Amino acid sequence: MKRVAAYCRVSTDKEDQANSFESQKRYFRECIERNPDWELFDVYADEGISGTSTRGRDAFNRMIEDARAASFDFIITKEVSRFARNTVDTLQYTRELKRLGIGVLFVNDHINTLEPDAELRLTIMSSIAQEESRKTSERVKWGQRRRMEQGVVFGHSLLGYDVHNGRLRIDEDGAAVVRSVFYKFLDEGKGSSVIARELEEAGIPAPSRAARWSHTAILRILRNEKYCGDLVQKKTFTPDYLSHKKEYNRGREAFVALQDHHEPIVSREVFNAAQSELARRSRSCGQKARYSGCHAFSGKIECGLCGSRFVARVRKSRDGTKKRVWRCREAVRHGTRKPSPDGEYSGCDIHLQLKEEAILSMIQQILAYLGMDTDPAVAELISVVNASLNTAAPAPACPPAGFCPDDAGRLLHILAQKKARLLELYLEQAIEKSEYLQKAEEFEQERERLEYRLQSGHRRSRLQEDESARIPSFIQSLIAGGEQDDPFYRNLIEQIVVRDPGHIEIVLKNLAVRWSFRREDASPAGA
């Protein structure tokens, strides 16, 4: 009596296939029971699994392990395509089974691997099955792209949106979290790590497929174009239909981009401002250093000698108290300035440890020197105070000379039309893929330049009249040495430049004055 195992597989779990699946198992049981020389060992069955790879086919892999353990003597299956649609896998496993003395009978194809000419016939049949899989994959991909171009959404729900029948619908609870992330990033000037920590402490559930809030999750939200109403698909693709492994699309396939596809959660102006701010924070005098919004002066202090940023360090005093100091990044990383073997220089000669309390003292001296109890002086810093009190948006940056926001908006609209037309030409096969990618990259660079200029001219501040009464007392408290929170100082300071250990310059936002401090002269002097 031969101990016989049966293997069957269907590639989807749809109802009609499920019926076929049960029919296959019933057929094999009856087939084995009708043969007096056979004894049923087990029926191995994979449901809803592709045959192009053995990865994920639990029943198949369990069958192979049982074969290696000599648990049965023979295998029957319906046809080659049910066993595997990958020629390499088919030959590899049938050869291994044959070495173990176990044959495979493909009923519909009339192939028994224990027969002399079985491998030739098996190679032909498995190649045909593999080619059919390739054609099916191409048909599916073509159909998906056409549906994407029609606006059908492929993918899972995300924070703020539910995907239902290929459409994006706003989830108000998630949308509120998204809006708060953009607000904290733009209006409060906080970094991604700080925002993640605050959301975690507030007990707000992390996005799906994330265990907890992280700076990476925040950056994904800030960079996701879906939140301003646009849809970009084909960000990932499957280069190999046999392995089914997805890869990030870095130009190998054209993206499918649709503007104003669905209802936005944040305005396009807010989203573009976030992209400009992300780009600004990532630029640190050509270095790879990233912006951090963890502290009030993150990204604000610049080394006047080497051009790098100062970074925060915590120092422990003799009495056990901890105080924050700021040091030049180049000096921290490379020490004193010196040449490297390739002729480049690294390091910095400014080894000053700038105490944070000294910075705060200088700011208080500036405000006291200005005489902040006078109305004109109050008006100069009113936008900064309002930003700290959450009564208005941050003050606008000065636009470039001769710049008109309306012109930039018009040019952006024209550029969007050009991009849409370029996509149409590519889809109509009027231009080659390489030409499309080159022009699309040029358009993207031009869009970034226009949006950066547009945002620098659009930031406006408005005062609420009911808050104006408490502003003078707030400033007087600051002059007297009252402590303020980090957002206040972030919105107050434009730049701090350490020229040398004894020469520090401070620039306040909205004041065209540079204040210099020297060790030998404790009082500030306007420049």
Image: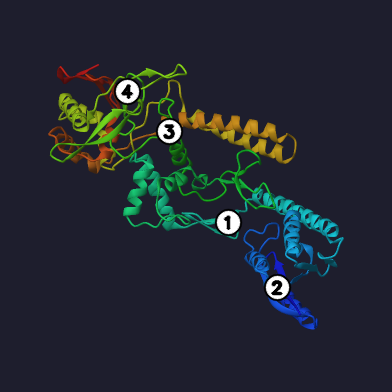
The type of residue carrying mark 4 is Cys
* Quadrant in the picture for residue 23: bottom right
Q: CA distance from mark 3 to mark 2?
A: 62 Å
The type of residue carrying mark 2 is Phe
Residue 518 spot, x, y in % from top left:
19, 18
Q: Looking at the figure, which quarter contains the C terminus? A: top left
Q: CA distance from mark 4 to mark 1?
A: 50 Å
Q: Looking at the figure, which quarter contains the N terminus? A: bottom right
Q: Are marks 3 and 1 in contact (CB under 8 Å)?
A: no
**Mark 1 lies on residue:** 167
Q: Are marks 4 and 1 in contact (CB under 8 Å)?
A: no
The type of residue carrying mark 1 is Arg
Task: Nearest to the eye among marks 3 and 2: give it.
Answer: 2
Q: Earlier in the sequence, mark 3 or mark 1?
A: 1
Task: Nearest to the eye among marks 4 and 1: give it.
Answer: 4
Secondary element under disc 3, as helix, strand or loop, is: helix
**Mark 4 lies on residue:** 303
Residue 282: image tag: 3
Local packing at callout 4 (Cα closer than 10 Å; few below 14, some 14-19, many 20+) is many
Secondary element under disc 2, as helix, strand or loop, is: loop
Residue 439: image tag: none
